Amino acid sequence: MSYELFYWPSIQGRGEFVRLALEAAGADYVDVARERGRGRGVEAMMRLMEGPDLKRPPFAPPFLRAGKQVIAQTANILCFLGPRLGLVPRAEATRRWAHQLQLTVEDFIVDVHDTHHPIAMSLYYENQKPEAKRRARFFTEERAPELLGYFESVLQRNPGQRGYLVGRSPGYVDLSMFQIIDGLRYAFPKMMLRLEPGIPGLVALHDRVAQRPNVAAYLASERRLPFNVDGIFRHYPELDA
């Protein structure tokens, strides 16, 4: 099946977790808002999302079109794609476990976002700096160590014993954890320098995922957008104290 991914064209954001899954599996997909031509671009994405044609419209990007289905919410998209792309084991209980972990990843993403936008998304970072500093201190000293420690413990308890979070081969949760580690290294390098010795399994997982042929090719391509101060992972030195 060919897939159409709808997400903002200039940031990694939540859409990157879906891109990584599609790229790792070698899936046939179009990143619609980054393309030009009829039915492509940001305008096409907004028309589909806000127009009258969909009976079940998404609230916001990312969303995925697969045949007649339109699926939104990152964890929900990955839950849909996982079995189809071979990125989750077959057992139903294990698939629920993977989805549970991905929902925890989504909590992690919210925590990262709120370090620079703790008051409102409609305000610029400059309009909420004092609150951001306070929130970032909580994140770097308490929340990030807690969440990374949790995923490290999950990794160590996986009966697969091959260094992955779910099952015996890399899946969409592992790809998402790669993105979390990569993003935190960009946004909070000082914090990660302090925390990484305590999460050796996750660090090794990050490196193992990055070396997968399809992932390595994607990371080296122009399709992999760079981190910047418009996405979820933003590097403001004053927040990485």
Image: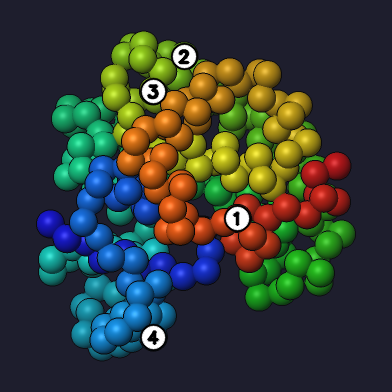
Measure the C-alpha gap from mark 2 to mark 4: 45 Å
Chain-order first, disc 1 or disc 2: 2
Residue, disc 2: 156
Q: What's the residue type where badge 1 is placed?
A: Phe
Residue type at mark 2 is: Gln
- The Cα–Cα distance between marks 1 and 4, rounded to whole angstroms, is 24 Å
Q: Secondary structure at mark 3?
A: loop
| Cα separation between marks 3 and 4 | 39 Å
Question: Which class describes the residues within 10 Å of circle 1: few (<14), some (14-19), or many (20+)?
Answer: some
Q: Is residue 138 above or below residue 194?
A: below
The residue depicted at 74 percent of the width and 72 percent of the height is 124
| Residue that badge 3 annotates | 164
Instruction: Look at mark 4 in the image and give the residue it sits on.
Output: 43
Q: Amino acid at mark 3?
A: Tyr
Query: Which image quadrant: the C terminus?
Result: top right
Residue at image point 60% right, 21% down:
199
Q: Is residue 106 visible?
A: yes
The circle on residue 182 is none
Residue named by callout 1: 227
